[in-house]
Image (tube, rainbow, N blue to C red):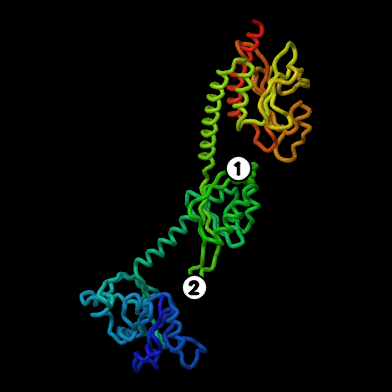
């Protein structure tokens, strides 16, 4: 923390310096004295080496001989209190210059008591700056013994209390973050490998704190690792972003893959011990917000679907032809919900295709050209199951590029279909047909909430179809 007095500081010892009663040393070991004899094999002018050692210290340091005279005073001590080494060395204690006279005896007694006590002693004093201001310091003092083993003086390292408290707070904060924090904390090195993982992060990543260390992030994150690594590289290169980011990732766990949303903040870590900032890695803090984001998505989806049904109802009310109203309803329902829709109505013992969207390209739901044609569904087909159960049936071939078009072709559906939802059309207690919604492989399978929406749409379409049949009879 500071710089020592130069070579001349050792000249203040007086006639005892040759007998080992020299100035107290700056070593942490109370048994190591200052001076040339303290360093085996030192150059002939040991005071130069001593001055250099004191110059490089980060702590304010002063030393007293056995009589309480200041023998050493480094530059950090000068920075803290404003007194130079020339002004400090040779004074008897702190009385009248570095401490109030009323407190001088107590301060001197407490400092010099370390000469006969084992180990270090910690005290807090209010010292005086050269400009008259007061500063509260925390001291660590220890006795120094001469070559004959007798007490030779005391050395005292001190720092401003607020600086010490700031350091202790920083240490306490880092320990709390890496132990008991309610959010995940991961420290990664410049190679983007975890070096420290707190307990919360270990649970979120599905491993133990030690098992995760040093492993590439790609081993832990199945999907989304590219975005995560890009964020970490950006922090290393340009610094921390101004706001947290939300990252969707898929984790590989013992129970299978889990998709999570992490609200993440990043901090670039640099060494405080170098003049130029040397990157040590990145501090990554995250919190799992999956439940909140899914709830928000569901709320947004519900608002959109409600709006679509409202618009569909208004549009259908303006249609003279009930079947046109039914297809208009389906056009609004398809938006954001499915890629294709098929309308198969009951005709005797069979289902006939009455309306559908184009098989080869996106488009509106239109009546089948040339009139209704029988749907050649094999036994056990999902549409037939829906009619038999008078309920909704969901089925899926899977997801991704591995889905074969044969799955859809066998069921008489468009080749790109990979997920299906069949909802029965019922009105006035009668089954009128079945409504089939289809999604491509690049979309997720239909869920329970999708089935509820499809049933609502099917109820409105069934009403329009029932009205069309009634009018046709009349």
Whether pointer 1 and pointer 2 mark residues with C-beta atoms closer than 8 Å, the reply is no
- Residue occupying image coordinates x 48% and y 68%: 272
**In the foreground, 450 or 329:** 329
Is label 1 or label 2 in front? 2
Which corner quadrant of the image does residue 379 belong to?
A: top right
In the rendered image of this protein, does residue 266 appear above or below residue 44? Answer: above
- Residue occupying image coordinates x 60% and y 42%: 259
Quadrant assignment for the C terminus: top right
**What is the distance, in whole Å, between disc 1 and disc 2 at their CAs?**
43 Å
* Residue 278 shown left or right of residue 131 in the figure: right
Which corner quadrant of the image does residue 403 belong to?
A: top right
Provide the residue designation for mark 2: 275
Residue at the left extreme?
102
In the rendered image of this protein, does residue 310 appear above or below residue 175? Answer: above
Badge 1 density bin: few <14, some 14–19, many ≥20, Cα 10 Å: some
Looking at the rendered structure, the number of numbered marks drawn on it comes to 2
Quadrant assignment for the N terminus: bottom left
Provide the residue designation for mark 1: 259
Secondary-structure class at tag 2: loop
* Residue 413 shown left or right of residue 143 in the figure: right
**In the foreground, 124 or 79:** 79
Question: Percent position (x, y) of residue 115?
Answer: 35, 79
Question: Percent position (x, y) of residue 286?
Answer: 52, 50
Mark toward the start of the polypeptide (1 vs 2):
1
* Residue 19 shown left or right of residue 209 in the figure: left
- Residue occupying image coordinates x 55% and y 29%: 305
In the rendered image of this protein, does residue 432 appear above or below residue 276? Answer: above
Secondary-structure class at tag 1: strand
Question: Percent position (x, y) of residue 217?
Answer: 62, 54
Question: Percent position (x, y) of residue 119?
Answer: 40, 74
């Amino acid at each position: 923390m500071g710089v020592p007095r130069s070579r001349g500081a050792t000249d203040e010892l007086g006639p005892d310096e040759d007998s080992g009663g020299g100035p107290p040393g700056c070593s942490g070991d109370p048994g190591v004295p200052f001076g040339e004899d303290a360093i085996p094999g030192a150059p002939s002018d040991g005071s130069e080496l001593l001055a250099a050692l004191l110059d490089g210290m980060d702590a304010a340091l002063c030393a007293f001989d056995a009589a309480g005279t200041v023998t050493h005073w480094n530059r950090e001590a000068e920075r803290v209190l404003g007194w130079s080494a020339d002004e400090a060395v040779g004074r008897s204690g702190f009385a009248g210059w570095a401490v109030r006279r009323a407190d001088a005896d107590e301060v001197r007694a407490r400092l010099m008591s370390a000469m006969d006590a084992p180990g270090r002693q910690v005290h807090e004093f209010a010292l005086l700056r050269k400009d008259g201001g007061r500063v509260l310091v925390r001291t660590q003092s220890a006795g120094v013994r001469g070559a004959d083993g007798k007490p030779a003086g005391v050395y005292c390292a001190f720092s401003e209390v607020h600086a010490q408290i700031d350091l202790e707070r920083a240490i306490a904060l880092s320990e709390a973050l890496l132990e008991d924090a309610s959010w995940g904390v991961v420290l990664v090195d410049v190679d983007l490998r975890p070096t420290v993982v707190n307990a919360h992060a270990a649970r979120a990543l599905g491993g133990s704190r030690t098992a995760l260390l040093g492993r590439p992030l790609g081993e832990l994150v199945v999907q989304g690792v590219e975005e995560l690594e890009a964020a970490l590289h950006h922090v290393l290169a340009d610094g921390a972003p101004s706001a947290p980011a939300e990252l969707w990732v898929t984790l590989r766990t013992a129970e299978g893959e889990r998709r999570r949303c992490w609200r993440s903040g990043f901090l670039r870590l640099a060494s405080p011990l170098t003049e130029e900032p040397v990157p040590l890695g990145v501090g990554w803090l995250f919190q799992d917000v999956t439940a909140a984001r899914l709830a928000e998505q569901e709320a947004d989806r519900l608002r959109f679907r409600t709006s679509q049904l409202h618009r569909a109802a208004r549009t259908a009310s303006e249609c003279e032809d009930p079947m046109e109203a039914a297809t208009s309803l389906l056009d609004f329902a398809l938006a954001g919900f499915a890629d294709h829709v098929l309308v198969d109505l009951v005709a005797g013992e069979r289902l006939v295709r009455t309306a559908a969207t184009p098989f080869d390209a996106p488009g509106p739901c239109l009546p089948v050209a040339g009139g209704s044609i029988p749907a050649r569904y094999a036994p056990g087909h999902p549409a037939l199951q829906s009619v038999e159960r008078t309920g909704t049936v969901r089925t899926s071939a899977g997801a991704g590029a591995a889905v074969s078009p044969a799955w859809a072709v066998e069921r008489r559906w468009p080749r790109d279909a990979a997920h299906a939802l069949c909802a029965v059309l019922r009105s006035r207690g009668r089954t009128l047909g079945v409504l089939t919604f289809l999604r491509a492989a690049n979309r997720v399978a239909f869920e329970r909430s999708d089935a509820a929406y499809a049933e609502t749409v099917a109820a409105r379409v069934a009403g329009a179809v029932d009205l069309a049949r009634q009018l046709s009879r009349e």
